C-alpha cells in the first residue's frame, strides 16, 4: 500500500468515526467469503456499517479523532479487524451473538459506546443486554402512561358508580323537597288560622 493509499484509507476510517457514538472492533478471521458476505448482509439490514481495516491504520485514524481518546482499545488491535459503526448501542453485539450461534467467529475485540470502553469478547453479553435508546424511551413512555391509564380508567368507571348511587338516592331526595313545601304550607295555614 502506497503512502497516498494509506492517507486515503485513514481518511475513510476517520469519516466513519467522526460522529460515531457506537464503535465496535471485531475479529472476523476464519470466516470464509460466503460467511463473511452473509455477516455483512445482516449488518447492512440492521444499519451497521462494517469495514475491514488494518490495525495500524485504524489506530492512526482513531488518534486523529478529537473529543474521544480511543487509546484503551489499541491493545486489542491484533490480527484481522473489522470496524463496526452503529446508531443502536446493542445492535452489533446482538448481530455477533446471533451469528455465533452457528459459527465460532466473529469475536468482539473491543467496543466504545455511551462514553465507556469494553475490552474483550467476555463483554459481549453485557453489550447485547444494553437497552437501545428506542427501547429505553419505550419503557419510560410505558411507565409514564401506566399511572395516567389508571386515572383515566378510574374516571371512566367513576361516572357509572356516581350514577348508580344517584339513582339509589334519587327517590329519597325527591320526596324530601316535595314534602317540605307542603309542610311549610301547612305550618303557614296553621299560623294564619290562629
Image (cartoon, grey):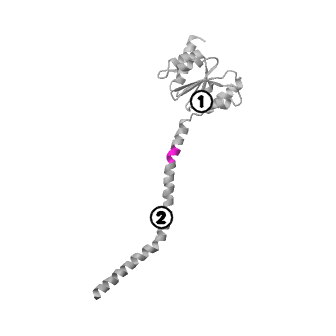
The residue lying furthest to the top in this view is: 2
Which label was assigned to residue 48? Answer: 1
Q: Residue at x 63, y 25 (%)?
A: 121
The reply to whether residue 9 is visible in this rendering is: no
What is the magenta range? Answer: 141-145
On the image, the x and y values in percent for residue 53 come to: 60, 19
Q: Earlier in the sequence, mark 2 or mark 1?
A: 1
**Residue linked to disc 2:** 162
| Label 2, label 1: how far apart the Cα atoms are | 57 Å
Q: Secondary structure at mark 2?
A: helix
Q: Verify whether residue 142 appears in magenta.
A: yes
- Contact flag, marks 2 and 1 (Cβ < 8 Å): no
Q: Quadrant of the C terminus?
A: bottom left
How packed mark 2 is, by other alpha carbons closer than 10 Å (few <14, some 14-19, many 20 or more), is few
Q: Secondary structure at mark 1?
A: loop
Q: Nearer the viewer, residue 69 or 52?
A: 69
Q: Residue at x 71, y 30 (%)?
A: 102
Q: Nearer the viewer, residue 20 or 124?
A: 124
Question: In this rendering, is residue 3 above or below 137?
Answer: above
On the image, the x and y values in percent for residue 99 come to: 67, 30
Amino acid at each position: 500500500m502506497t503512502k497516498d493509499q494509506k492517507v486515503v484509507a485513514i481518511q475513510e476510517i476517520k469519516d466513519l468515526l467522526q460522529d460515531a457514538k457506537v464503535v465496535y472492533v471485531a475479529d472476523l478471521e476464519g470466516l470464509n467469503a460466503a460467511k463473511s458476505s452473509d455477516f455483512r448482509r445482516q449488518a447492512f439490514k440492521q444499519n451497521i456499517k462494517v469495514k475491514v481495516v488494518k490495525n495500524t491504520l485504524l489506530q492512526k485514524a482513531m488518534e486523529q479523532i478529537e473529543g474521544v481518546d480511543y487509546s484503551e482499545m489499541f491493545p486489542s488491535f491484533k490480527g484481522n479487524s473489522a470496524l463496526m459503526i452503529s446508531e443502536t448501542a446493542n445492535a452489533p453485539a446482538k448481530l455477533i451473538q446471533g451469528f455465533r450461534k452457528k459459527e465460532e467467529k466473529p469475536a468482539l475485540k473491543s467496543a466504545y459506546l455511551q462514553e465507556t470502553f469494553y475490552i474483550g469478547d467476555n463483554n459481549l453479553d453485557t453489550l447485547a443486554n444494553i437497552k437501545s435508546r428506542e427501547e429505553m424511551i419505550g419503557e419510560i413512555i410505558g411507565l409514564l402512561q401506566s399511572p395516567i391509564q389508571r386515572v383515566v380508567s378510574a374516571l371512566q368507571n367513576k361516572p357509572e358508580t356516581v350514577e348508580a348511587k344517584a339513582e339509589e338516592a334519587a327517590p329519597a331526595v325527591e320526596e324530601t323537597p316535595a314534602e317540605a313545601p307542603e309542610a311549610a304550607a301547612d305550618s303557614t295555614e296553621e299560623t294564619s288560622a290562629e
